[in-house]
Amino acid sequence: MIYVAVAVLAVLAIVAVLAAVRRRQSDAAIGMLSRETRSRDRSSVVLRAEAPPTGREVEKAAAAARAGGAPAPTDSGGPPAPYVPPDPETIGVSRRQFFNRTIVMLMSLSLSGFGVACIAFLWPQGASGFGSKIKVGLVSDLLAEIRDNSGFLYKPEGRMWLTEYPNGAVEKAIATYSAPELAGMTAGHDLGLDGGIVALYQKCPHLGCRVPECVTSQWFECPCHGSKYNQVGEKRGGPAPRGMDRFAVEIGADGSLTVDTGTIIQGPPIGTNTTGQEAEGPACIGQATGH
C-alpha cells in the first residue's frame, strides 16, 4: 500500500508541474507585444488620433472646467481609419509556422527516400552476377580452358568452379544426379565432345570455407578442416557432411553453357564416387584429425 500511495503522489506531482508549466506558457503568450511594435504604435499618427485621453488629461480638464475654464474633453470618436493592407514582407512567417513547415518537409523527404529504396530493392534486377543466370560460354571453349588450367577453371563472377565430367561416367551420373545437374554432365554426349562440365559452388559444405584446387592431387582440398573432394566435387575425405554443392546448368542450342547461380543443389551423399577418380599425386592439405 505504501508503494501504491507513493506512486499516486508522484503521478499527481508530475501532473501539477505540467499544469503549472502549461499555465505559465499560456500566460506568457497572451498580450505580449515586442518593443519594436510598441514604438511603432506610439509613432503612428492614426493610432494617436484614435487613442482616448489619459486619466491625467481627464483630471486636468475637469479641474479647469470647475474653475470656469474649457469643458472636459470627451471621447467623441472620429471617422474610421482607412484600411491599409498589411505588408507581407513585414508580417513574414512566424517561428511556429517555420518549424511546422520544416518538420513536414523533412518527414516528406524521409518517407519519399524510404519509398524509393523499397521500390529499388523489390524491382527485378537485370544485371548479371552471383544469384542470377550467367552465360559462361561455349562448352567446347570451356573444356579447352579447363584443360589449359590443369583441370580446374574458376569463375569469380559466379563463385564457381568448372571441371570436366568424363563421358565414361555418364551412366552412373544418370542414376545419381538430378536433371539440372545432368544437363552439363551429359553435354559431351549430346554435343559430340570429349566430356561434359560440372559447375561447383566454391563453399565447403562443412563450415563454408572457400575450397581451392590442388593441382598435384587433382582434387579439391579445403584448407580449413581438410575435407577433400574429387575433381567433380564428390567427397573423398574429411569432416564434410556431403560432396560439394553444385549449380543448375542449361545447355543452349548453340552449345553454350548457362549456370543458374540462384539455384544451389546439395552435393551428393558420402560414398558417392561416380568417376572412380583417386588422388593423382601428393595432397596439398594434411589429413583432417578431428571435427
Image (cartoon, rainbow, N blue to C red):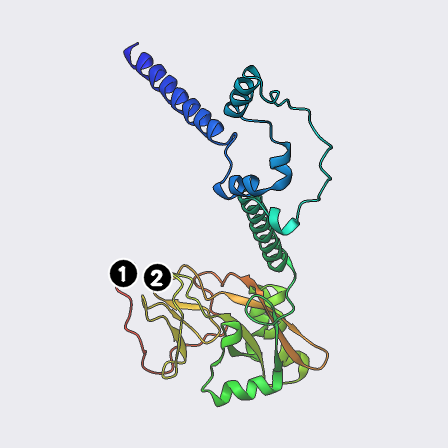
**x%, y% of residue 222?**
36, 70
Residue 118 falls in image quadrant: bottom right
Q: Is mark 2 on a helix, strand or loop?
A: loop
Q: Decide: marks 2, 1 in contact (CB < 8 A)?
A: yes
Residue linked to disc 1: 290
**x%, y% of residue 116?**
62, 57
Which residue ends up furthest to the front in the rendered image? 68
Q: Foreground: 57 or 186?
A: 57
Q: Residue shown at 36%/15% (left/top)?
A: 8
Say which label, 2 or 1, has the lower sequence index. Answer: 2
Quarter of the image containing the C terminus? bottom left
Residue linked to disc 2: 239
Q: Is residue 197 above or below residue 5?
A: below
Q: What element carries label 1?
A: loop
Looking at the rendered structure, the kind of residue marked 1 is Gly
Q: Residue shown at 69%/76% (left/top)?
A: 252
Quarter of the image containing the N terminus? top left
Q: Residue shown at 60%/36% (left/top)?
A: 48
- How far apart are the two marked residues, 2 and 1, measured between alpha carbons? 7 Å
Q: Is residue 269 above or below residue 218?
A: above
Looking at the rendered structure, the kind of residue marked 2 is Pro
**x%, y% of residue 127?**
62, 71
